[in-house]
C-alpha cells in the first residue's frame, strides 16, 4: 500500500470520524438547541402569561379608575347643586332679612303714628269729659230750677184749691147772709165784690196752671238722657258715613230740623235731612264755600256758628225757609280739613228768650255731640288707615311668596319639594303677619282674605293649585271665601 492510498484511507477514516463526530456534535447541538429553544419558549410562555395577567390586572384597574371617576363626577355634580342651593338659600335669607328690617321700620313708624293718634284721642277724651262735667253741673243747676218750678207749681195748685174752697165757702156764706141779712145791701155788695175778685183770681190761677201744664218739659231735664242715647248710638257706628248719619239723627232729638252737608271741591253738597217738608230736596242743595251762609261760615272757620233773633231775618244766611229762633252749624274737622257740616234749627218750636235757657242747652248739646263724633271719626280714620296698611303688607308678603315659587320652578324644583318650600314660605308669611297684626291690635284674618283672593285670581294655574294645597283649602272654597 502506498502512501497515497494510506493517506487517502486515513483521510477517508478521518473524514468518516470527523463526519461521525460532526454528526454526533450536530445531533448534540441540535438537541442542545432544541432544549434551549424549549426553555426559551417556556420562558416566553411564562412571560406571556405574566404579561397577560398584568394586562388583565391593568384593565381591572382602568375599569376601577373609570368607575371612581364617574362616582367623583357624580359627587362633584351633587356638591355643585348643593352649593348652588346653599347660595340661593343664602340669597333668600339675605332678602328675608332685608324685608324684616323694612318691616321693623314700618312697625316703628306705625307705632309712632298710633301713639300720636292715641295721644290725640286721649286729649279729645279729656275735653269731652270736661265738657260732660260742665254739662252735668249745668244739668244739676237745671234740676234745682226744675224742682223750684215744680214746687211753685204745686204751691199754685194748692193756692188754687184754697181759693176754690174759699169760693165755695164764700158762696155758702153769701147764701146764708143773703137769707139772714136781706136788709144789709152794703154787706151783700161787698161780699159780691169779694166773690168776683176771688173768682177772677181762681180763673187766673187756673189759666196759669193750664199754661204751665201745656208747656213742654224743660229741655235741661231731657238733655242728659238724649246725650246718653246719642253717645250709645254713635259708639255703635262702624263707618265714617254711619257716624255722620247717626249724628244727624241724634241732633234731631233737640232740634226739629237737621240737615247734613258733605264738603266737596269748593262747595257743600246736601246729603241727609230730618224734619223738613216734602218740597225740600237736600240732595239738590249746593252751597258754595265762599257765600255768606251759616253752613259755609262753619266750614271755613272750623267752629260752631250760631245765629239768633234778628240775624235770622236775613234769609241769605240760612239755606232753608221757616221761622227759626235759633240756628247753628257744627263742622266736623279731621286733621285740619272739614269733612262735613251739620245744620240744625228750632223752626216750629216755641222760642225761648231767656239767657241760659233751652236754646243755650241745645247749643251745648250740639257741641258735645260734635266733639264726640269727631273723636269717633279720628279713631275710625286711624283704624281704616291701619287696615289699609296691613292689607298692603299682606299683599306684599303673598307677592314675595309667588316670586319665590317662580324662582323654585326655574331652579328645576318640582312635585313634593316645590310644595314643601311653598308651604314653609306661607307659614312664615302667616307668622310675621300675625305678629304685626297682634302688635297693632288688628284682626289677624286679613291675610287669609288676601290669600283666598290670590288663589281665585290665579285659578287654573299650577301656582294656584299648589298654594291652595299649602293653605289647606281648595280653589273652589277660596273663590267662595273671597
Image: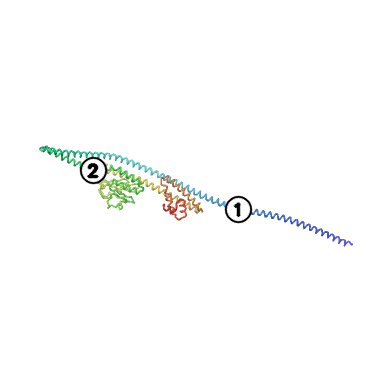
Residue closer to the observer: 158 or 150:
158
Where is mark 1, residue-wise? Answer: 67
Residue 316 horizontal side relative to residue 202, left or right: right
> Residue at image x 60%, y 53%?
67
SS for callout 2? helix
Q: Quadrant of the N terminus?
A: bottom right
How was this image coloured? rainbow
Q: From mark 1 to mark 2, how far is it between C-alphas? A: 116 Å
Q: Residue furthest right?
A: 1
* Mark number, residue 331: none
First of labels 1, 2 by sequence position: 1
* 10 Å crowding of disc 1: few (<14), some (14-19), many (20+): few
Q: Nearer the viewer, residue 374 or 172?
A: 172
Judged left or right of residue 298, residue 398 is right
Report the front residue among 92 and 140. Answer: 140
Residue under pointer 2? 213
The percent coordinates of residue 241 (x first, y second) are 34, 49
Amino acid at each position: 500500500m502506498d502512501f497515497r492510498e494510506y493517506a487517502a484511507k486515513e483521510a477517508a477514516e478521518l473524514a468518516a470520524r470527523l463526519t461521525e463526530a460532526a454528526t454526533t456534535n450536530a445531533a448534540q447541538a441540535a438537541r442542545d438547541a432544541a432544549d434551549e429553544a424549549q426553555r426559551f419558549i417556556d420562558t416566553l410562555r411564562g412571560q406571556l402569561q405574566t404579561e397577560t395577567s398584568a394586562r388583565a390586572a391593568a384593565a381591572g384597574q382602568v375599569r376601577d379608575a373609570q368607575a371612581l371617576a364617574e362616582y367623583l363626577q357624580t359627587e362633584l355634580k351633587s356638591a355643585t347643586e348643593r352649593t348652588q342651593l346653599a347660595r340661593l338659600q343664602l340669597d333668600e335669607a339675605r332678602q328675608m332679612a332685608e324685608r324684616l328690617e323694612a318691616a321693623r321700620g314700618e312697625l316703628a313708624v306705625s307705632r309712632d303714628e298710633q301713639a300720636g293718634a292715641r295721644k290725640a284721642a286721649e286729649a279729645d277724651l279729656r275735653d269731652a269729659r270736661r265738657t260732660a262735667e260742665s254739662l252735668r253741673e249745668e244739668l244739676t243747676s237745671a234740676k234745682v230750677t226744675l224742682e223750684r218750678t215744680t214746687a211753685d207749681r204745686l204751691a199754685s195748685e194748692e193756692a188754687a184749691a184754697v181759693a176754690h174752697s174759699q169760693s165755695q165757702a164764700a158762696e155758702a156764706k153769701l147764701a146764708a147772709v143773703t137769707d139772714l141779712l136781706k136788709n144789709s145791701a152794703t154787706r151783700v155788695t161787698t161780699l159780691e165784690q169779694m166773690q168776683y175778685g176771688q173768682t177772677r183770681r181762681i180763673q187766673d190761677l187756673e189759666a196759669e196752671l193750664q199754661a204751665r201744664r201745656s208747656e213742654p218739659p224743660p229741655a235741661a231735664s231731657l238733655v242728659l238722657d238724649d246725650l246718653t242715647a246719642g253717645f250709645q248710638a254713635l259708639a255703635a257706628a262702624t263707618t265714617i258715613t254711619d257716624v255722620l248719619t247717626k249724628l244727624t239723627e241724634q241732633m234731631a232729638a233737640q232740634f226739629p230740623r237737621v240737615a247734613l252737608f258733605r264738603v266737596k271741591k269748593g262747595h257743600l253738597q246736601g246729603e241727609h235731612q230730618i224734619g223738613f217738608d216734602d218740597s225740600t230736596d237736600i240732595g239738590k242743595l249746593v252751597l258754595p264755600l265762599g257765600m255768606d251762609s251759616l253752613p259755609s261760615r262753619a266750614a271755613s272757620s272750623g267752629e260752631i256758628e250760631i245765629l239768633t233773633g234778628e240775624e235770622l231775618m236775613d234769609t241769605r244766611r240760612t239755606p232753608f225757609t221757616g221761622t227759626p229762633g235759633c240756628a247753628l252749624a257744627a263742622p266736623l274737622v279731621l286733621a285740619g280739613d272739614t269733612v262735613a257740616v251739620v245744620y240744625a234749627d228750632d223752626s216750629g218750636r216755641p222760642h225761648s228768650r231767656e239767657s241760659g235757657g233751652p236754646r243755650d242747652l241745645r247749643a251745648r248739646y250740639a257741641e258735645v255731640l260734635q266733639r264726640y263724633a269727631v273723636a269717633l271719626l279720628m279713631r275710625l280714620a286711624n283704624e281704616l288707615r291701619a287696615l289699609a296698611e296691613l292689607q298692603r303688607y299682606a299683599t306684599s308678603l303673598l307677592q314675595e311668596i309667588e316670586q319665590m315659587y317662580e324662582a323654585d320652578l326655574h331652579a328645576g324644583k318640582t312635585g313634593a319639594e316645590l310644595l314643601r318650600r311653598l308651604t314653609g314660605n306661607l307659614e312664615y308669611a302667616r307668622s310675621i303677619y300675625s305678629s304685626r297684626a297682634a302688635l297693632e291690635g288688628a284682626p289677624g284674618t286679613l291675610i287669609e282674605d288676601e290669600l283666598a283672593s290670590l288663589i281665585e285670581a290665579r285659578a287654573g294655574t299650577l301656582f294656584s293649585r299648589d298654594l291652595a294645597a299649602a293653605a289647606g283649602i281648595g280653589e273652589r272654597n277660596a273663590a267662595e271665601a273671597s
